[in-house]
Amino acid sequence: MNRRRPKAAEFQEDKPLSQSHSETLAKAPPAAPVEWRVSDALTPYPEAVAAMEARAAAIARGEAPELVWLVEHPPLYTAGTSARPGDLLQPGRFPVFASGRGGQFTYHGPGQRVAYTMLSIAARGGDLRRFVADLEEWIIRTLARFNLKGERREGRVGIWIARPGGAEDKIAALGIRVRRGVTYHGIAINLDPDLAHFAGIVPCGIQGGSTSPYGVTSLLREGILISMPELDMALRGAFEEVFGPTAAA
């Protein structure tokens, strides 16, 4: 597995783990299964952030198990800690929320599965580079279950689908924040969102347009006709391969 240094756009760390502290951390995942929760209704973004922050704090205190929370949001844009104002191309189109995660501008909306990961990287050895690579691997294995080849690209955040002639389209994004050794925010995979909604921003700083080799795609656009529950099943199976067992929340 790729152990490269994570891109600055991928994460925001409130208090980096020192090398000496990292060496004293447990080297295996927590014994308890990760709780797995799916919300069926659209989840307002501010409510999601408040819930993530509360759960991450409880995990850090040892008062709650780790959690993966699958949601869909109403149409909105989020601005990560590296967002550039000029990358918001249509300011009045959808609500814009400042986000504490790493990264730049991202779109969330119906038809996109967002998986929020409240996981203890402290209990997993404190290796942030490995954690980011594992998130990417999780996405890649999920897509592979539908015979779709997702790939990493050095210097570009997310998972990409290669095209003939060198063009590439982004199918999944990731961005996390780390607080007291616990992550929150997470990944987003495009199942069947309205791809026109991405035109209101420069997604993750990658400039698109008619002359750009980079665009945005979805499973539907790639000819994968599946439901959200089917995607969720693939996400859970791939997660367990990479991170370990889960249990219904």
Image (spheres, grey):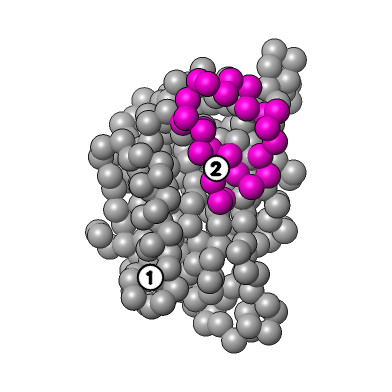
Looking at the rendering, which quadrant does residue 114 occupy? top left
Q: Between 12 and 223, which is closer to the camera in this rendering? A: 12
Rendered location of residue 34, percent (x, y): 35, 65
Residue at image mark 2? 98
Quadrant including the C terminus: bottom left
Figure check: 1 above or below 89: below
Which range of residues does the magenta coloring cover? Answer: 76-101
Q: Amino acid at mark 2?
A: Ala
Residue 174 shown in magenta: no
Residue at image mark 1? 58
Figure check: 114 above or below 242: above
Going by the image, does 74 lie left or right of 213?
left
Quadrant including the N terminus: bottom right
- Residue at image x 43%, y 64%? 56
Rendered location of residue 213, percent (x, y): 72, 23
- Residue at image x 73%, y 45%? 154
Residue 85 shown in magenta: yes
- Residue at image x 64%, y 36%? 204
Q: Secondary structure at mark 1?
A: helix
Figure check: 216 above or below 97: above
Q: Between 185 and 214, which is closer to the camera in this rendering? A: 185
Q: Amino acid at mark 1?
A: Ala
Rendered location of residue 231, percent (x, y): 36, 39
Discs 1/2, front: 2
